């Protein structure tokens, strides 16, 4: 019995090998997907987006631990309490981490290579993701100081892409342990 089973396994493996030899490796297939949906912002992001439409960045401050969240979700993830305090933040920020995107994304007009960074704006304690530009990709680094480049005011909407991108500014790097801990007045404020 065991010999027969062994023979059968060998036969299956050899058939599998023949199949892949004939068909070659499948490296990708096109699967077009259209996904249209509505986003219900909720109370805290609604207040945030209303300010973004005016060209201002605001965060939600926790009454217990004072952490400032942007975009605010309405509660502090650490303390589990509502963050009803709204504080205005700077549009200067520090690079916390980044990646160089080298692969084109279908329907994305931005041509690689480009930088996507986690930036922490001054006065906030957590980062959000945004595009970086007007930079030499190879020179981008953790702790680098950047500032938002906004669209013209007449194009502002309830959206974070009112900020086109962040660009490097001529300020000293922020040490890693200070990233996400700067006051709203900035690195030298
Ligand atoms: Zn808290």
Image: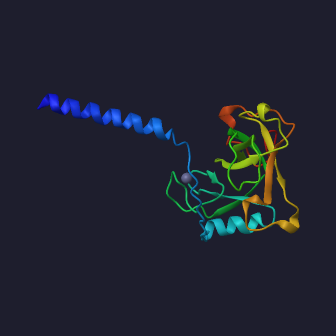
Residue 163 x %, y %:
79, 56
Please report the residue visible at 71 percent of the width from the left and 31 percent of the height from the top: 175
**Residue 55 location (% of width, % of height):** 81, 62
Q: On the rendered image, what quadrant is the N terminus found in?
A: top left
Q: Nearer the viewer, residue 99 or 6?
A: 6
Residue 54 drawn above or below residue 9: below
Q: Which image quadrant for residue 187?
A: top right
Colour theme: rainbow
Q: Nearer the viewer, residue 102 or 78?
A: 102
Compare residues 109 and 17 and report the one nearer the observer: 17
The image quarter in which residue 34 lies: bottom right
Task: Judge left or right: residue 171 versus residue 179.
Answer: right
Q: Is residue 73 left or right of residue 111?
A: left
Position in image of residue 59 (x %, y %)? 68, 57
Residue 122 in view here: no
Figure quadrant of the C terminus: top right
Give the number of marks. Answer: 0
The picture quadrant where one finds residue 75 is: bottom right
168 displayed left or right of 80: right
Residue drawn at the location 47% of the way across and 38% of the way down: 22
Instruction: Name the residue furthest top.
Output: 3
Say which residue appears at 59% left-offset and 66% top-offset: 35
Residue 149 in the image: state x and y as whole percent: 84, 52
| Residue 171 in sight | yes
Residue 125 higher or lower than 31, as above or below = above
Q: Is residue 87 above or below residue 98?
A: below
The residue that appears at 74% across and 48% down in the rendered structure is 131
């Amino acid at each position: 019995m065991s010999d027969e089973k062994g023979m059968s396994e060998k036969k299956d493996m050899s058939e599998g090998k023949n199949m892949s030899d004939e068909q070659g490796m499948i490296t990708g297939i096109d699967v077009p997907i259209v996904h249209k949906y509505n986003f219900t912002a909720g109370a805290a992001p609604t207040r945030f987006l209303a300010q973004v439409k005016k060209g201002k960045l605001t965060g939600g401050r926790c009454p217990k631990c004072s952490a400032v969240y942007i975009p605010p979700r309405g509660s502090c993830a650490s303390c589990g309490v509502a963050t009803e305090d709204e504080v205005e933040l700077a549009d200067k920020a520090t690079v916390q981490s980044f990646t160089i995107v080298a692969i084109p994304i279908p329907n994305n007009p931005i041509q690689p290579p480009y930088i996507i960074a986690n930036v922490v704006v001054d006065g906030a304690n957590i980062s959000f993701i945004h595009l970086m530009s007007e930079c030499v990709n190879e020179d981008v680094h953790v702790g680098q100081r950047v500032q938002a480049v906004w669209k013209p005011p007449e194009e502002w909407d309830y959206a974070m892409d009112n900020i086109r991108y962040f660009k490097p500014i001529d300020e000293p790097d922020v040490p890693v342990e200070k990233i996400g801990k700067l006051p709203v007045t900035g690195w030298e404020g």
